[in-house]
Amino acid sequence: MDHRILVISGGTDGVSCWGDIFANASKEKRIRGTIIDGMSRDIHGSREVGYPAYGLGVTMISARNRVVQVDSGTPLQRIEEVLDLAEWIYRRQSLMFDAVRAGKPVSEVTHDTQFEAIHEGTPSLTAVSVALSSKQNPKKASAEDQELVALFAGSDTPGVSDALDKLGIPGQGFGIMPLADYKKVFVGPAFTVRYVPASDPPGSVGDFIDDVAIGDFVVIDNGSRTDCTVWGDIMTQYAGLRGIAGSVIDGVCRDVNRAINDGYPLFTAGRWMRTGKDRVQVGGINELVGIGKVRVNPRDIVVADANGVVIVPRNRAREVAEVARRIEKSEESIREMIAGGATIAEAREQLGYHTLQRQG
């Protein structure tokens, strides 16, 4: 059984169809993992034995007397064909990585006919050669960009969010979450990108990355679509090499292990593996976009950390940064009072905690 993966379909979001007893039994039988079209529970049991389970979410409600198994087993169909094509694509991606790592622009790599030939099934990969040239990002941040980014040194998204509230400015990116538990705060001017459904023939999906300056934050509006990605491992590697601050996506990303291992900051509405090629294309660059119910203009200031993402309008950046510093200073004073023996009520009352973010 060590080559099998359990796939449980027809699940519902109200009850669990997987728990720790199943996880332990599957581990003993050397089953590789479980994919659940539904919910699971007792997830600590799967974690304790190191058994991989993928589902739509977690609930404590048992499936007993609520759902039953009706069938099992699925015949193999076209598996060899799929695996052969997957191997070709993987080898093609590896060559593309080498080209990007050496400094070749993504726009050239993704349109190189040699790589496309591999995708179409060229039998000899040894015949493929890529002209590589070392190239650093020639686009630099402006003096004003650097000044505005520096204003938020020492701040975090909770403090900036409170400052936005106090000033009556909407800026919190609802539903946009960090890919990992980042330990630092990332700040940069927004380089905005708007995606639209693909035309016939389809347009480009990632060529804009060559125009992003060092320290910029790529902000992608994919219309909140979660059915296809607009960011993957090649973009991650190239963005890291170019000194880009991070990426915020109103949509999903894929190849997440690459971003996590590289330490590249990604903030998205989720993760999924389905490509955006031939499904979406770039519809506009450096224009007004929407991210998590927030309007973002080119060069607005993006502040992102483990708590999420906030967008600061460029023309209010100095004001927001100053208010954020005052709020964070008050909260630090509250923490010091508590450490010195004051009650939380006393500290909050003395320093006006409940009105820190209130307008007026």
Image (tube, rainbow, N blue to C red):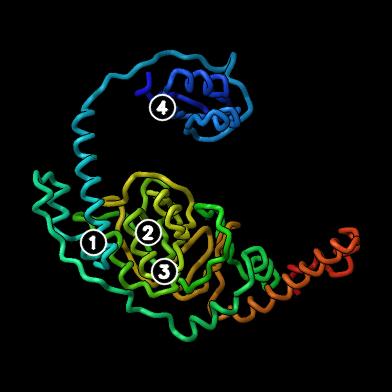
Any mark on residue 244, and which?
3
Q: Nearer the viewer, mark 4 or mark 2?
A: 4
In the rendered image, the residue lying farthest to the bottom is 143
Q: Look at 36% across and 44% down and name the residue there.
A: 273
Can you identify the residue that label 2 sits on?
A: 236
Q: How far is disc 3 from disc 4 in space, using C-alphas?
A: 37 Å
| Residue 129 visible | yes
Q: How far is disc 4 from disc 2 in space, using C-alphas?
A: 29 Å
Can you identify the residue that label 4 sits on?
A: 32
* Residue 31 drawn at (x, y percent): 42, 23
Q: Nearer the viewer, mark 2 or mark 1?
A: 1
| Residue 40 visible | no
Q: Nearer the viewer, mark 3 or mark 1?
A: 1
Please tell me which residue lies in front, 275 or 182: 182
Q: Residues within 10 Å of mark 4 (few under 14, many from 20)?
A: some
Any mark on residue 99, and which?
1
Q: Amino acid at mark 1?
A: Ala
Is 148 situated left or right of 347 in this image?
left
Image quarter (top left, top right, bottom left or bottom right) of the C terminus: bottom right
Is 115 situated left or right of 212 in this image?
left
* Residue 105 drawn at (x, y percent): 25, 67
Q: How far is disc 2 from disc 3 in space, using C-alphas?
A: 10 Å
The answer to whether the residues at label 4 and label 2 have Cβ atoms under 8 Å apart is no
